[in-house]
Amino acid sequence: MIAKQETLNLSPYMALYDLLIPKDNMLRQINELVDFSFILEELQSKYCLDNGRNAIPPIRMFKYLLLKAIHDLSDADLVERSKYDMSFKYFLDMAPEDDVIDSSSLTKFRRLRLQDMNLLDVLIQKTVEIALEKGLLLSKIVIVDATHTKARYNQKSPKEFLQEKSKNVRKAVYQLNKEMVGKFPTKPISNEITEELDYCRQVVEIVETQSKVAQIPAVKEKLNVLKEVMDDYENQLSYSNDPDARVGHKSADSSFFGFKTHLAMSDERIITAAVVTTGEKSDGAYLQELIEKTRATGMLVDQVIGDTAYSGKENLDYAKAEQLQLISKLHPVITNGSGQRKIEFDYNKDAQRFVCPAGHLATHKRRTGKKSANQSLTFHFDIENCKVCPMREGCYKEGAKSKTYNVTIQSTTHQTQAAFQETAEFKELAKNRYKIEAKNSELKNPHGFKTAKSAGLFGMEIQGATTIFVVNLKRIMKLLNAKE
């Protein structure tokens, strides 16, 4: 049950915050900038209002998730730090002497309260509203791109992944306490995951009961990661049971296992829309959705800047119909011409090859036809994958010895765009695309968006929502400080 109104905190120690938390502290600035009551309004339907014990305030639980995104901590380490970090307690609207939550409450909050909330759109909408109210969004330009996030569980066997995390714990212990060498049990030699889990439990127990360094952060953080991984495996949240993480391609020779976040960002570097997908999805397919979501926030859009992945014919037609200038350089492989195919393959601009609907990347390509006429590119796929593919009907002919996908190169199909991209205006606007690359880097490095913190598309959406919310608020505060 949640209270129908907020209670006034009458702690005699509240004045400590005025002494300990400076005016320029980021968490203080966020508290002053954002009215978090919108979270209570969004989550009221998830709680009972007149029955049961009082729940932890939803706004406080949400703020815990924001702190997790700001500082890239595990649940256990986040709660531990909130015991003694006064800036955390201030941000969480707690009195200095208040007890903190149990870390398991965060897991329950994510799973039970945030389902079906569409948190990603809600939080982006809120930050864009703030930016518009403060007069910070003046341009009518959005920049689009996609950034990839590796799945929490790599394409390793469960045993290999647990071995890696338990090894990290042992290594951290040995570096600080050499007396522990030889005190851990013998590592299992079978491939049974149950034996590896038992071994990890023994490692945790020995570190916590026999080691003198269990509470040192360098050890405790790695121990908490091992515990979370063990818990995920026991609750069937490992990557092998994750139906969402997929293989995507960064180039013809490199790939990743995980998810993609498709982003739209204003020229002022505030993210205005996002769509989280599995890793194999094509960047260009989400342009229209990003533009529509951006406009739904109240921002006006006249120009869209993107790389070659967004210059497909559908996007060019959409831009024309919506009276948008699409600053996206054409690629001869994307200009497919007017030929109709029963099954459309997606073009991966990083690998410069097509990907079939099942996610398989072409192995190689070759150019055919006379130079004086329209030429075509033929993409070859691994026929062994096609033979066992669950989507082979209508795509693979039984008994075929090869699988190819042909694309006609017709530069005349997009003459208007081809002419536009040679103008000084196009070239000048295209220079702004670097801004979203920097934003991708900011999401990944300080805020941990490089790797998923949980399994599944829903967990990735929660991570994306909180991380983008934090990054947008930081940008808004920076712009406001620059105006003063």
Image (cartoon, rainbow, N blue to C red):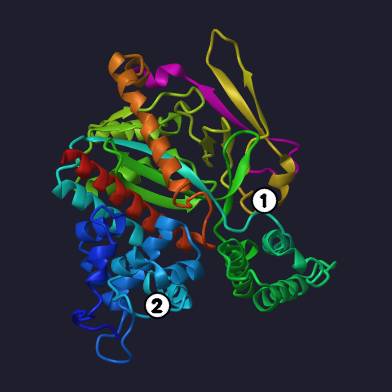
Quick check: 473 left or right of 104?
A: left
Query: Distance between the Cα atoms at labels 2 and 1?
Result: 51 Å
Residues packed near mark 2 inside 10 Å, few (<14), some (14 to 19) or many (20 plus): some
Q: In this view, does 277 lie above or below 337?
A: below
Quick check: 260 left or right of 391?
A: left
The quarter of the rendered structure image containing the N terminus is bottom left
Q: In which quarter of the image is residue 101?
A: bottom left
Q: In which quarter of the image is residue 157?
A: bottom right
Q: Picture coordinates of residue 215 (x, y %)?
A: 58, 70
Residues packed near mark 1 inside 10 Å, few (<14), some (14 to 19) or many (20 plus): some
Instruction: Write the residue at 49% across / 41% down.
Output: 282
In terms of secondary structure, where does tag 1 sit?
Answer: loop
Instruction: Write the residue at 79% across / 65% down.
Output: 181
Query: Can residue 451 be seen in this snapshot?
Result: yes
Front residue (pair 432, 351): 432
Q: How many labels does the image show?
A: 2
Query: Can residue 292 be seen in this snapshot?
Result: no
- Residue type at the position of mark 1: Cys
Front residue (pair 382, 309): 309
The answer to if 217 sits in the magenta stretch is no
The answer to if 406 sits in the magenta stretch is yes
Q: Name the residue under label 1.
A: 389
- Residue type at the position of mark 2: Val
In terms of secondary structure, where does tag 2 sit?
Answer: loop
Q: Name the residue under label 2.
A: 100
Instruction: Write the residue at 22% across / 65% down.
Output: 18
Instruction: Write the residue at 40% across / 21% down.
Output: 413
Front residue (pair 13, 223): 13
Point out the stretch of residues depicted in magenta: 394-416
